[in-house]
Image (spheres, helix red, strand yellow):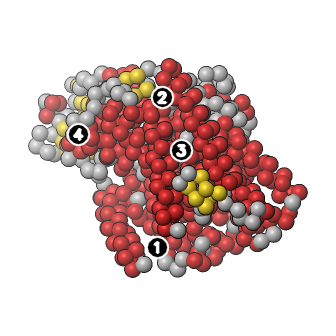
Amino acid sequence: MKKILDRNRICITIALLALVFIASLPAFRSGIYQGHDLDFHLGRIQAIAQELQKGQFPVRYESEAWYGHGYVSTIFYGNIFLYIPALMYLAGMPVWRAYNVYVILVNIATVLVGFYSFKGIFNSRRWSLIATTIYALSGYRLSNLYVRTALGEFTAMIFVPLVAYGVYRIYVTKRECHNRLKLTMPLIIGTSGLIESHILTTEIVAVFVFIFAIINFKRTIAVIKELLIALVATLGLNAFFLVPFVSSYSSMKLYINSAMTQTSIQGDGLYLSQIFGLVTIGRGSNWPWSAENEGFLNLGLLTVLCFAIIVVTIVIVLTKRHWLAPNHTKEKFKMAMTMFGFGVISAWISSIYFPWDEFAGESTVDKLMSSVQYPWRYSMFQTFFFIVAAVYCLKLVGTKISDRTDGKVIEFNLLKRIDTFSMITFVIVGLLAVATTGIFDYTLSWGNVTVTYTDAPADWADNLYLPIDTDRGLLEATEVVIDEDLGTVTLPVLAYNNLHVYDESRNELEWTAGENNCIQAAYSGNASNLTVEFVEPASWRVASIISFILFILFIIRIIITYTRH
């Protein structure tokens, strides 16, 4: 028996390594395909490295962005994982290669975390392997990796399954685990990973978790202590990011929280031909009110098959109700159908058929909804929810087939004691995943330009976190403007909060936002003697200390918990 289990583990390990290799093929090249957001994320990596060299830690302000005018994307965009490629860049690695290594590391983490999470949800390694295969090679994730180069989103996709497992673990397995830290750990780590990767994904996940808690209200009351522990621990561990984020978002008028939400994003929604698009294309751009040249947003054959499997299973269950005779089966089927419902809702919200026009404005709800920028971000959740529901349905069918054949099993190479149905399913899923990934990689190779940036482009920064009404074109000018009549000097530095201006004697000068939202101060001396520094408020430092202490305590508690058990 031990030998068989060891062989099974070896085969599963080989399958997981193969998944990482297949997903990472484009990242093994001597260059990067020029993705939509590539310049921005290369710039983030380089900016972190530059600020670390200057002694800024944690990095809150990108002083060299926008031709030296500065930028604050790092306050609003979790960057803790980008310290890894930033350190590679500091060690002398070209920024493009540091990025590619990061992509490979993300694929490794996605496969490992996904397998662990799905195994917890399905209580089965073989079904976990199937779910992980579909998830790792799903069309939307591949597009995030290599077409959109949406670093924040594809990093966040590591943790989405872990959050789902964390919620499932609390709601379903509480009776089996009396250690609250051990019980809530997946949810705490998963949510923290989301926060430090992509705040928009975090917001959407939070909404789905809230809806799930309302639907399962009675059970929610029973596990409210565990949920509160997870919430408090997550807020404390991530206070070093959340406190600066909330204070800056609420106190600065930027494009992302002002002008952007006043325009409807409905035209960027998906059409049914994309939601049920069988082939994900490795090229294209985003065009409002059109699906032409947007094949990179097609969700792909595997996701469509997941939808078909769920629908067929629902029909079977409606005609053969004895399939759900045991109460625990009914409970799990209900949960799977909840996931399917969430997937359908996600598909609707991601489409042009959702009334996005109603959320173009300045209200809190408008800003919360429209901050997603593109409706098709919900495709990530449609994909995930369909995978969970479909794999459960396959497992349910497999169990019934196994029951009818008295649990008969077969030997397949080194894999033993794996039923025929799950093995056939894995082979089919694997072949389809490799085939569709091959088509994606082929179209990626001829549809995109390859770049090999040693350093990030000078114009890497976007406009999301610029002060409202800033003229980006004027930011190329880096001259100091002196008005002798008014006795003022305008520095080529954007007027963000927490910037301090000092003269040659280290006396601090009062300043206001002047022309094109640049710092303007009353000063009659030599402007070259002025220096501008970003200074963290005391509350930010306190938040960082709290997070650090809680992190150390969290690690110590984990070590004690697992050494005792």
Amino acid type, mark 1: Leu
Residue matched to label 1: 181
Amino acid type, mark 3: Ala
462 left or right of 533 in image: right
How far is mark 4 from mark 2, CA to CA? 25 Å
| Front residue (pair 328, 265) | 328
Disc 3 vs disc 1: which is toward the camera? 3
Q: Secondary structure at mark 2?
A: loop
Residues marked 1 and 4 touching at CB (< 8 Å): no
- In which image quadrant can residue 532 be found? top left
- In which image quadrant can residue 383 be found? top right
Q: Residue furthest left?
A: 505
Residues marked 1 and 2 touching at CB (< 8 Å): no
Sequence order check, earlier mark of 1 and 4: 4
Q: Residue, x 30% and y 22% (percent of image)?
A: 477
Whether residue 223 can be seen here: yes
Amino acid type, mark 2: His
Q: Residues within 10 Å of mark 4 (few under 14, many from 20)?
A: some
How far is mark 2 from mark 3, CA to CA? 21 Å
Q: Position of residue 184 (x, y in %)?
A: 50, 69
Q: Residue, x 62% and y 45% (percent of image)?
A: 427
Whether residue 228 can be seen here: no
Residue matched to label 3: 136
287 left or right of 29 in image: right
Sequence order check, earlier mark of 1 and 2: 2
Q: Is residue 115 above or below residue 554?
A: above
Q: Residue, x 69% and y 57% (percent of image)?
A: 395
Where residue 36 is drawn, which disc sits there?
2
Residue matched to label 4: 90
